[in-house]
Amino acid sequence: MKKRTLVTMLAATVAVAGLAGCSSSQTEETAAATEAAAEAGEEAAEEPAEEAGEEAAAPAADGELIRVGIINNDPNESGYRTANDADLKAMFTEENGYDASFAYSLKNDEQITAAQKFIQDEVDYLLLSAADTSGWDSVLQDAQNAGIGVILFDRTIDASEDLYLASIVSDMEKEGETAVNWLEEQGLEEYNIIHIQGVMGSAAQQGRTGALDAKVAEADNWNLVTQQTAEWNSEKAQQIVQSVIDSGTEFNVIYAENDDMAKGAVAALDKANISHGVDKDVIIMGFDCNKWALEELLAGNWNYDGQCNPFQASYIDEVIKKVEAGEELTEKTIILDEVGFDARTITAEDVEQYGI
């Protein structure tokens, strides 16, 4: 679509915040496409940010390819991110009418540099999963001035809604609240919690941390033994928990903000022969619902896992198609449906349906 047409659309779009329900799992067809994309796009997933922006040679059957620049976190960060990246690669293909370039980083400044390059390359749309919620106003303004539509996915940012077309995200605050409410229902006499945080400043970290911080502040029997970031990394999480074990400090809950960090925490417990899971010494909590993590719940080795839905590409595609067709966007914010799983009630069917 012509840039001047997009600018007109941006000016005419009514920003109405709303909720859109979605399936919490992929269809069989989407799952197959995602798996194929993950295998076929393995090399592309490792493409550095500075190589982003290359044009595809073949045009779409009905006209020029829509050029999208996709900025995401490192696909090796977690199982969630791998699934998210594969989902995007399965959707944004030449067969579907797109010329897609990818850039990856866990650092906000590197993502901003990649965004500036995509703007210089005159992509039609900039798709963004921001490493940090702040610092994006000037980049988004530059994109808007250039007639480039910005669509947020996975994570929110602190910027005016006028600077982007739509935001397709999880409700990270609700994820945190659901997890903390579940933990409160366990009825422990005292909560001594090892809190392992994700990358500081990210929407996921802020939402999952905020709910726990609020509960600790209001309840006398909720204590943070330690609160440290492992930056979504399993080995760093293991080191944090090992340090607490070595100090001799008592704890009975590990609240890890993703599955990989929960896995690292459990490795430290196993090394020290500390029991964990259902009716054991330490409650284990994770997020993202990797299939292997849900299997740990099913086996009773973990206690809770909060869903974070990585399958957002179809929603982004729908937004782009509406803009390309000249339709008005009536929803500025699309919230993905998500749930939390308890080891006492999870089923094998849940693992198959919701595991990523």
Image (spheres, rainbow, N blue to C red):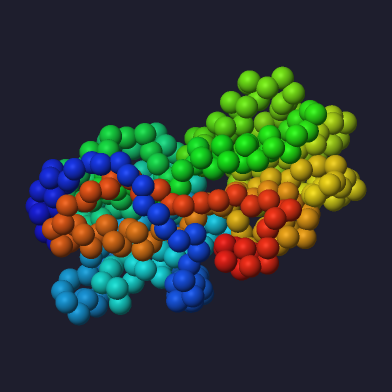
Count all numbered tags in the image, as a single digit.
0
- Residue lying at 75% horizontally and 34% vertically, measured from the top left: 187
Kindly tell me whether residue 102 is visible in this rendering: no
- The residue furthest right is 273
Q: Position of residue 172 (x, y in %)?
A: 49, 41
Residue 208, above or below 68: above
- Residue lying at 68% horizontally and 22% vertically, measured from the top left: 219
Q: Where is residue 332 in the image (x, y as percent from the top left)?
A: 28, 45
**Image quadrant for the C terminus?**
bottom right
State the residue in front, 307 or 247.
Answer: 307
State the residue in front, 202 or 329.
Answer: 329
**Image quadrant for the N terminus?**
bottom left
Kindly tell me whether residue 93 is visible in this rendering: yes
Query: Is residue 210 found left or right of 109 in the rendered image?
Result: right
Query: Is residue 237 found left or right of 338 in the rendered image?
Result: right
- Residue lying at 53% horizontally and 61% vertically, measured from the top left: 82
* Quadrant assignment, res 313: bottom left
- Residue lying at 34% horizontally and 67% vertically, measured from the top left: 92
Q: Where is residue 48 in the image (x, y as percent from the top left)?
A: 44, 58
Q: Position of residue 279 (x, y in %)?
A: 84, 47
* Quadrant assignment, res 177: top right
